[in-house]
Amino acid sequence: IADVSPIGDFDLAAVYVSDAQYNRNIFFDTTPQAIRLYLLYNHWGLQILVYAFILVDLALAIFEDPAVVPLPIWVTSVIELVCLAAFTARLVHYAKVIPRERFWKDPKNICIFAIILLSLVDMIIYGALKASGFYAVRWSRVLRPLLLVNITEGRQLRRAFRSIRNALPQILYVFLLFMFSVLMFSLMALKLFGKRGLKTIEGRPYFTNYLEIVFDLYVLVTTANSPDIMMPAYNFSVYFAVFFITYILINTYIFMSVFLAVVYNNYKKYLKEEVRKLVRAKRHKMVRAFGVLQERKGEEEPVVSQACWNQLVRLVQPDISNAHRELLWSVSDDNNKGCIGKVAFVQLADLLNIQVIMMKSRPHPLKTWLPSLYLSSPSRLVCRMVQHKAFMYTYDLIILVNAVFIGLDEEDPLIANVEWAFLVLYLLEILLKLYSFEPRAFFSRHQFWNCDLSKYNIQLNCPFLSILDIVFILRILRLIRVVDNIKRFRAIINTLIKIGPTILTFGQLIVVVYYIFAMVGMELFKGKIRFFEANSTDPDKAFCGNPLLKNSVFAKHNYCKNNFNNVVSSFILLLELTVVNQWHDILFKAWENTDIKMFFVLFHIVVVIIIINIFIAFVLEAFFVEYTVDQSNLQSSLEKKIEELELGLSACFLPGYKTVDGLLQRMFEADLDPEDFAEDEDFDPNNPSNLNFPNPNFDSV
Amino acid sequence: IADVSPIGDFDLAAVYVSDAQYNRNIFFDTTPQAIRLYLLYNHWGLQILVYAFILVDLALAIFEDPAVVPLPIWVTSVIELVCLAAFTARLVHYAKVIPRERFWKDPKNICIFAIILLSLVDMIIYGALKASGFYAVRWSRVLRPLLLVNITEGRQLRRAFRSIRNALPQILYVFLLFMFSVLMFSLMALKLFGKRGLKTIEGRPYFTNYLEIVFDLYVLVTTANSPDIMMPAYNFSVYFAVFFITYILINTYIFMSVFLAVVYNNYKKYLKEEVRKLVRAKRHKMVRAFGVLQERKGEEEPVVSQACWNQLVRLVQPDISNAHRELLWSVSDDNNKGCIGKVAFVQLADLLNIQVIMMKSRPHPLKTWLPSLYLSSPSRLVCRMVQHKAFMYTYDLIILVNAVFIGLDEEDPLIANVEWAFLVLYLLEILLKLYSFEPRAFFSRHQFWNCDLSKYNIQLNCPFLSILDIVFILRILRLIRVVDNIKRFRAIINTLIKIGPTILTFGQLIVVVYYIFAMVGMELFKGKIRFFEANSTDPDKAFCGNPLLKNSVFAKHNYCKNNFNNVVSSFILLLELTVVNQWHDILFKAWENTDIKMFFVLFHIVVVIIIINIFIAFVLEAFFVEYTVDQSNLQSSLEKKIEELELGLSACFLPGYKTVDGLLQRMFEADLDPEDFAEDEDFDPNNPSNLNFPNPNFDSV
């Protein structure tokens, strides 16, 4: 290691630090050429490009049959080929970066390779069949969302999938027990109600067919057909209500809670384990970077000098300000020795992840240009007034009053004029604030709450109704500012904002699952229900173009748009099924067959029982962390340093981490073994216990 | 303390130990007379009597107007007077047991006193008004369920109420934020959809009245009107679906999870605190008992001799067997010294709470009566066969086959005959088992799984259809035995059975809340909807006797029995509202006014947001404990001792605790400070931090 040229050393160390900062676990060759390729591979431009291609690939569903906007097959095929070419290029690039034998060991790469290959085969078969006039199915479309999981740097998404996979056996046992309970209750229901000759509201025999009872009682677990399913028996005798009450208590309340408990417990357990590994890997990478840069003076502990450290930080984060870098150094080198040891050096990755907005407290530009006017006593009074809390409260009140006016009828010309008065008041607020605060400070502080207002001003003149709608919504969003000023609420809102990015991970997870179900659903059920515009006079409109739906709840409730005729309505339909209510009415009446029941029960198990519960588990855990943990040690020492140094800059310090991994790490920080660091040299990726890492990270030192 | 007569000493010590065992926190006078009164107060007979009177008092709602079974006013009044007299007697008894000044400091007693007084006043007013022909309301009926909370030894119930009260401020903040979000979205909805002239399915204008929008969107949070509420906007334009998707994501998924998080977090925090206090109080009581009985030899540590200990245990638990008592002593006196110190003595309360079923492994009676026959080789073969696992599996299979036959049509005479064959097989099983196992061992081991079968045999000849129904259900319950034989499932079932008793606490909680809402609901809404029997030809049947309900969903779905006309249907209606689905349809269409909306929104907040979430929190916590904690130390040492001693008895050891407090204590055992014991002498009930104990327990030593 010591014989590499110094420049190469810094590059290598910078790559290690950057990998540690962003928790990348890719084992790359350490030759200068490979490092350059690796840096290119990690370039944000290329990563965005990959995401863009995936987005285009997924969006093809909008243009393919059954399409929202139909395009000829050759157009979509060419676009898909371009996307596949891009994915292949990305895969080849990755293969160049890491050693050959490691490339084929990683199931992720094999998965991407297989998807590309299968998509090509499917396109050829589909094209050939279509050309010869046969019926053909584009079955490889269900594979597309898997690219989102495998090709991107979406570690969170992969982790979510792994935690689902790990929880599956436990969920399965509870599910079997749950299904056993449903089957048993169905048997009881058959015996209790089957021979009484009761009728449902629709006039069909009540609880006479075992399989139908099983399905009805399964739907009752989701509460979607309560109390309808109970009414015939309850109307017959009040005692039969006991059966349904027992059923709901056991299967809806207890079993659903047990599902949540099992999912939550597994989620916590495996997540903790993964984050522990992640932290160890991060520390290991930092130790490697330290090993590259260390200087050893005689018998002393090896250290890294400030000059060396500065150069490294500049390489890792070129846009870092000098003040920020000096602040980080002073936190690391607490005793002003001019050099830092391993323990302090390893912190660097975490330090870089803490978001600090540095601002020199500059004088107001008017103060420099027109000092006599700006410093005059009326001008000072205005500044003091604007900076007073009463000013804020006044505007909170104005916003509230404005909200009331928004709620009132706008037909009245007086109210419409009042709207303009409010606009003037808001403009006045901005001007006054710009006058009394230094502009940069103003914009960085009010970034979020003013953006809506600025849009308001720009877009109010826009004639389109839809943009005016957005403006109305944005105006109403200003109300959040009022709530945010109350301390108790701010704590809750801050937590909600912090878990926002991770909700995006779940969003991706949902998109993957929805996409697969939408593709299958479209192939199975497209065109069976038709939606007619409101002004249509087609006689088929009364039953959504499907004679089976004559006089059905589905048609009466105007559900015709809930269909699988294109990818957008499929997604909205699946969302309605996730919300669960009326799901048994949404489609089963249209296809009185068992296939569609199985399709939806499967969807319910995957989305409602597993994914929604994992989502709830995440929100629960995030809130517990927010309630119990205040700040990490590193953050507090950074804050202390800022106060100590009085750097002549007002640091707008954003508590919290930039990355989701940061939040996760903080979640389990209390449980992490502090001795992990001392032992990290023993970290052995070839150890079988690490096998569930999809990417073995390092070879042994 | 040393000068009291020995008999009095043992009584006092026994009372302390018994209080510690059952976690009673009553500060009683220590005079022999007061102790005797206190023992009487704690007598199980009196406690059951109190519960019986409460039950009768609550059940009066069945006979009072609006009644299920109408009784004259004077009958119900006399019964209520008797109940009130019983409660007064109980209160006076309690007042005799504890010092006067403590009696009036306890809000519980004041509460009971006020309830009795108010009930009497209400009865007098009601009687007078009725006698003079005026309209009168029995408003004191809403107070009745509070007796269940205050007069009984229902510590769990009071604790659940306290944990709700403690969580309220936090819940309130989240609720305000949640309502703010609903109000904001309603404002947006008004602006987006109000002027488009859309119509709901019923032909009313869509989203034009702000308050109606707020209510509709509140109902959407419960998912009860999904997707109906979205359809008009979605049919108009697909982009409007985004509004509803955002709304559901934020308010249904995120906010409801946050409610669970807040409730769960508070529940855990306060429960831990309360259980900690409970354990300290228990140890303190045991130390007091030790102080009464201790013998000090010179400078040595004070001890309690075995003779003394034996006498104490016999007093505390007269029905304990000698073998069991010797076992407990050998666990306490691990080194066979003949006396035990304070630390070992304090364990006694917990030891007594561990359920051990002791059975001498006696020879089979046939072996003693007919040894030659019973020990012959064919007889031995039968015994070995029955004890083999294959025998169990064979019968599991038989039960499954029987389940299939139950599911089949019983009209077929062949199948009816097959049923008799199964009955013969089950009888054979019992006879074979009785032959090969010692009868007492057989019955204790198969207590649960055979009881249904024995009922089956007795009741099959019973001509009533309803009993036959029960028999069918019991037969199906035998299927549980099959599942219970699979280890993975048994773990889950055991946990479910263990949390059973605490679910009863939540059951009481629900009854209290339901009762109050039912009383109010009956006064407000009784008689507005009428239910007609199936064979009725009354023309009003089509709209439940309420012209407002003509052509309503309510009447069409045969919901007429969902009314407040008597206490039973009120309870079932409230249960349906708890399940949430269709709740907006169940009653609002019948009374198009805001009062009933407020009534149900309040019910939703109290039951669904608070109580159901606390229930889920409890199930979650119980499952986590089951997954992580295996056995308490005390249990393992008891098990070890049983193995060590080879007492010549097969102890059927039931893991788990008899009491709910035991489970709770185990839940937080890991977090309890082990030093608590050393400091327990300092336990000061007059400390302000103990004020949220309703009963201050002890004066300072």
Image (cartoon, coloured by chain):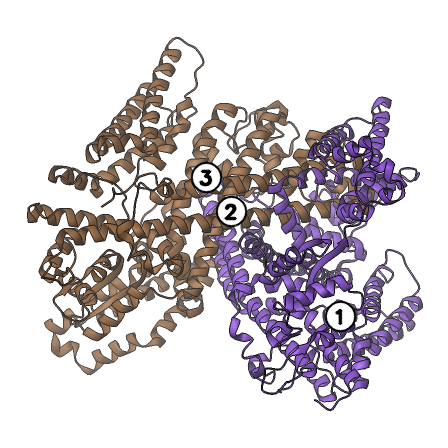
Chain colours: A brown, B purple
Q: Which mark is residue A165?
A: 3
Does residue A608 sit above or below A275 in this rendering?
A: above
Please state the horizontal and vertical placement of residue B663, each as a whole percent of the image.
Answer: 63, 61
Subunit under mark 1: B
Subunit under mark 3: A
Q: Residue at x 50, y 25 (%)?
A: A526
The CA span between labels 2 and 1 is 38 Å
Does residue B624 sit above or below A59 in this rendering?
A: below
Q: Is residue A178 left or right of residue B421?
A: left
Q: Does the residue at mark 1 contact the one at mark 3 (Cβ under 8 Å)?
A: no
Mark 2 or 3, nearer chain start: 3
- Amino acid type indicated by mark 3: Arg
The quarter of the rendered structure image containing the N terminus of chain B is bottom right
The CA span between labels 2 and 3 is 11 Å
Q: Which residue is mark 2?
A: A263
For mark 3, does the 10 Å Cα neighbourhood hold few (<14), some (14 to 19), or many (20 or more) residues?
few
Q: Are marks 2 and 3 on the same chain?
A: yes
Q: Does the residue at mark 2 contact the one at mark 1 (Cβ under 8 Å)?
A: no
For mark 1, does the 10 Å Cα neighbourhood hold few (<14), some (14 to 19), or many (20 or more) residues?
some
Q: Dividing the picture into quarters, in which one does residue B163 lie?
A: bottom right
Q: Are marks 2 and 1 on the same chain?
A: no
The foreground one among B592 and A260 is: A260
Q: Which residue is mark 1?
A: B152
The foreground one among B76 and A213 is: A213
